[in-house]
Amino acid sequence: MSTAENVVQIHSQEDQTEVAAEMIADEFVSVEDLAPVHRDSAERSRRRMQAEISELARRNRWEDVLALCYPVDEKCPDLVAHQLDAPIRSEAAFALGHVNRFDDAIAELKICIQADSRNFRYHSSLAYTAYNSLFAAKNREVFLSGKHRTERVELAHRHFRQAQLLRPDGVTNFYRQGMLYKQLEDKPDKALPLFKQAISHWDKMDESERQDRHYERKNYIKSLYQLASTALIKGHAKAALTLILRCIQEDEATAVMGIVFKYFALGKVQFHLGRYNDAADALRFAAQQCGRQPKDFVCELLARAYLALNAPARALEAVEQVPEKARRPYFRWTEADVYCALKKYDLARAVLLQTAEKDNRGRHKALNRLARLEYLQGRFEDAAEFAQKADAFFRNHWQKPCAEALFMQAVSAYRMKDVAEARVKADELFELDPGYRQLDKLRQRLRAVSATEESPHD
């Protein structure tokens, strides 16, 4: 080799050594960024895939979305290699949620959060997926119970809170967490402030902000509706009336909430305020919007409004709008009440017996109605038997005595002159609910009987 060639080789080696010495390890910029041809290719691939996913999602073709990109590690190795996979994982998770594969969706979103822990969308999506899985379980679309359900509730709350921290002026995550408390945990007290926050955040936005965040308006409307419902649960009927009227007005042009539900809610609030004519007006209007087969819950409350207006014939008309096979247990209780108001006691008895046989959750309510019906017809032994069955069912399901069943057992025993049994049941009821209606009068009667029994004979 010539001297010149040696010099070139030495300089070449020195240049390589110099370049290698200047490279540093950095989390933001890599050596590959000096000649990013492969990364640029991966970026283009990601954009193409997101566009395809967007088009498929627009047409609700969730299985096709998954066929395109899931599992992400197998379908998109170039994106994984260049750490560009998180957006695709997020899209895959959304599709997985739509086909009720919630565990897989959550796993993908956890990887996204690991890659970008300050990403609002990922926390919001994970919270929503967990929340959605709980509703699916409630509707018996998937199985989720015990410890697994408790963990899923905690997961939803944790990521709702994180999303709220990242976007403290938002609407949707406050609304959804409120629904988690109200509908899935039966904690209206905790739901109330979250619905209020969602509404307050929308109210504070100017018109430009509302246009930018237009997608949150629907959850503002839903928050008004749910806050009205929660206020009514808490006994604040006047506040609920203001809120549901505002919901109806705000939603007039957009129809986010179905008109049946809004006017049913209005009727329910008016009913609780004792404004039965107004309640009937709202409920009739709701029923008219239902089509040929009105929603059973609308007609049931309409029937009760007519009963309150002493119009049992009209109440029966409301009942008959719903086919018999579509009448759920709570509907049949009201149906029996209507027959009683019409003095058609045999029909009421038949309805209640049929309902008690089929209802595996609220059977005690039909049995207690049967106990009252038998009692008022002077059949005290039958009344006591129905009340005993109601109490046994209630204790078996809720591990405590049933107040109404105890009272009916006590008064039935009293009428049958079984004072000892009447006293036992009345004392048990007093321990459970000392203010129970008519209990004080019954106890007075029992004390009077005891005093007579203990007085000396002439």
Image (tube, rainbow, N blue to C red):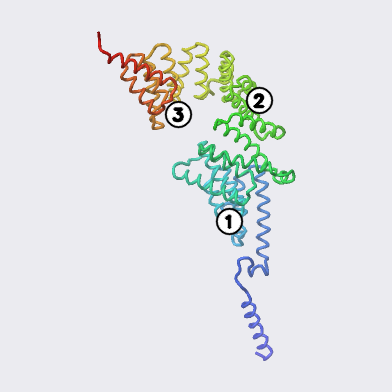
**Gap between marks 1 and 2, in whole Å?**
47 Å
For marks 1 and 3, give the CA distance: 44 Å
Give the vertical position of 60 relative to 411 (above or below): below
> In the image, is residue 368 above or below residue 82?
above
Quarter holding the N terminus is: bottom right
* Residue marked by disc 2: 289
- Residue 435: which quarter of the image? top left
Residue 214 place in picture, x, y as percent: 70, 43
| Among numbered discs 1 and 2, the one appearing first in the sequence | 1
Q: Amino acid at mark 3?
A: Arg
Contact? badges 1 and 3 (CB < 8 Å): no
Number of callouts in the render?
3
Q: Which image quarter holds the C terminus?
A: top left
Q: Secondary structure at mark 2?
A: loop
Sequence-wise, the earlier of marks 2 and 3 is 2
Percent position of residue 267, x then y:
61, 25
Q: Secondary structure at mark 1?
A: loop
Query: Which structural element holds mark 3?
Result: loop
Q: CA separation, marks 2 and 3?
A: 31 Å
Amino acid type, callout 2 = Gln
Percent coordinates x, y for residue 204 in the rendering: 69, 43
Circle on res. 117: 1
Between 77 and 427, the one nearer to me in the picture:
427
- Residue 269: which quarter of the image? top right
**Going by the image, does 155 lie left or right of 458?**
right
**As shown in the figure, which amino acid type bears the numbered disc 1?**
Ser
- Residue lying at 52% horizontally and 18% vertically, measured from the top left: 335
Of residue 13 and residue 180, the one placed in the foreground of this image is: 180
Residue at image mark 3:
361
| Disc nearest the viewer among 1 and 2 | 1
- Sequence order check, earlier mark of 1 and 3: 1
Q: Are marks 2 and 3 in contact (CB under 8 Å)?
A: no
